[in-house]
Image: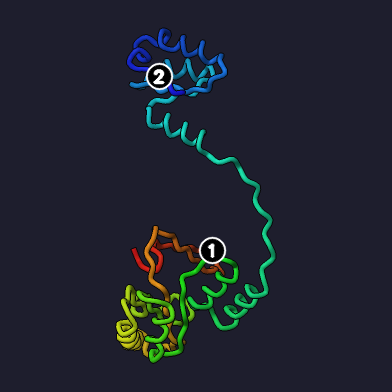
Amino acid sequence: MIFVVGSSAQFNPELAVEPLLRFARTAKPFAVSLTPAAEKSLGLLTAAGVPAFRHPESCSEAMAVCLLRPAPQLVPALAEPSCAALDALEAGRVSGFDERRAADLFAALGVPMAKSMAIPDAKRVVAAVAEVGAPVVLKICRPISRTRPRRAGVALGLPDGQAAAVAAREIEKRVKAYAPHAKLDGFLIQKWSRGLAEVILGFRRDPGGPHRHRWSRRCAGRDL
């Protein structure tokens, strides 16, 4: 129950507070919102152990948290990584983590991933799009690093295989112009999906101190 007390809380605090203090001795839980704010009444109620608020919004939010908050749950015991997860981790350590190998690792750990397919060159783009299902995102496969040409190596929202094939040839040209000596390991075709915003968090180990983090907001499969 929520009591909302008006101007009498400000101008007649004893009159406004006394009935509430008597009600506090009952078993019914309640809170009080004082509108407008009345510091003396607020102090009297707080001293008596009655939850009181200066604004109805903060009062309702507190009640919602109190009544709707789920009961605390025990933290489940973490299982040992599977052999597939350990193999994917080792493959990334040996060959370097590109997005494909990172996705393999997360999938082995049980994290849901967008449907994708890695191909060695642009000649197989059309068949890969047919397998994954349009629309798709096209990305270059290359070990993740600070110098990776992210914008040059990504095409979003491709409606079919022909559009993806054209985009693959354009990406090859852009990457060559951006980094003439870069060696590409093929392409990653990934299902383009829409949904709620997600946070993608990455980090790298800084030998000179603590980890440095960076984050960006994206929708599933596309930039916001």
Q: Position of residue 112 (x, y in %)?
A: 52, 66
Name the N-terminal-most of marks 1 and 2: 2
Q: Give SS at disc 2.
A: helix
**On the picture, is 197 further left or further right than 103?**
left
The image quadrant that residue 58 belongs to is top left
Residue occupying the point 42% across, 60% down:
198
Q: Position of residue 107 (x, y in %)?
A: 55, 70
* Mark 2 residue type: Glu
Q: Quadrant of the C terminus?
A: bottom left
Q: Give residue 57's mark.
A: none
The mark tally for this picture is: 2
Residue 174 position (above or below residue 86):
below
Q: Position of residue 131 (x, y in %)?
A: 43, 81
Residue occupying the point 38% across, 27% down:
56
Instruction: Pick out the residue farthest to the top.
Output: 15
Residue 110 position (above or below residue 146):
above
How far apart in space, not on screen, are marks 1 and 2 (Cα)? 46 Å
Q: Which residue position is annotated with label 2?
A: 39
* Mark 1 residue type: His
Q: Which residue position is annotated with label 1?
A: 211
Residue occupying the point 37% across, 90% down:
180
The image quadrant that residue 146 belongs to is bottom left
